[in-house]
Amino acid sequence: MYALFIVSSMFLSFINGGLTIDCPKTPSKWCETKEIAQACGVTEQCTTYVWKTRVENELVNLSIYYETLCPDCRQFITTQVWNTYQSILDIVNITFVPYGNAKELYRPETKLYQYYCQHGAEECYGNLIHACVINFYPKTEEHMGSDPPAQCMKNL
């Protein structure tokens, strides 16, 4: 009698798609697995707000401060950074900061600031252009794609 009950329960369970997963009562557990998220009806929310955030937070953050006309910065970015970026782009989040070794001087007569860059006015302008590109294309893949603007540093 019991054997027949167990066999029939297993058969019905198999027909209904196997063992079902119940949605936990605690919302903090809803995104633990894809199966639980599906049972709770929150797969889209888990993908958008939990799982994507976890993946982004697991990347190594690397900020590179550089000057557009500095010969050492140019060589470093166009050789070392570019070659390394291509091989580790899936584990690193690189942020480029065209910072420069600039001095700031306030002119009271014009009520404006004047900037002096280590490698001249052209470098200040180059830093401004790079900052503008990075502002409008903030994702590293956008400004470091297969033909990156950083590669144009060779021609400056």
Image (cartoon, grey):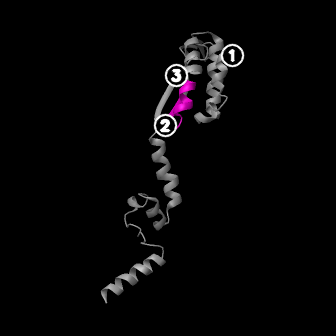
First in residue order: circle 1 vs circle 2: 2
Q: Position of residue 42 (x, y in %)?
A: 49, 62
Q: 55 above or below 75?
A: below
Cα gap from disc 3 to disc 1, whole angstroms? 20 Å
- Please state the horizontal and vertical placement of residue 58, each as a whole percent of the image: 44, 41
Residue bearing the label numbered 2: 91
* Residue 79 highlighted magenta (yes or no): no
User: Are dots 3 and 1 in contact, CB under 8 Å?
Assistant: no
Q: Secondary structure at mark 1?
A: helix
- Mark 1 residue type: Asn
Magenta residues span 81-95
- Tell us which disc is closer to us: 1 or 2: 2
Q: CA distance from mark 3 to mark 2?
A: 20 Å
Residue under label 3, please give it.
Answer: 65
Looking at the image, residue 87 sits to the left or right of residue 129; the answer is: left
> Label 3: few (<14), some or many (≥20) within 10 Å?
few
* Residue with the most extreme bottom position: 1
Tell me which numbered mark, 3 or 2, is placed earlier along the sequence: 3
Q: Residue at x 38, y 66 (%)?
A: 24
Residue hosting label 1:
155
Q: Quadrant of residue 102?
A: top right
Query: Which residue is more in the foreground, 101 or 149?
Result: 149
Residue 130: image x %, image y %? 63, 24
Q: Is residue 49 above or below residue 125?
A: below
- Quadrant that contains the N terminus: bottom left
The image quadrant where one finds the C terminus is top right
User: Which of the numbered marks, if any, corresponds to residue 67?
Assistant: none
Q: Does residue 94 show up magenta in the picture?
A: yes
- Number of marks present in the image shown: 3
1 and 2 marks in contact (CB < 8 Å): no
Q: Is residue 136 above or below residue 36?
A: above
- Amino acid bearing label 2: Ile
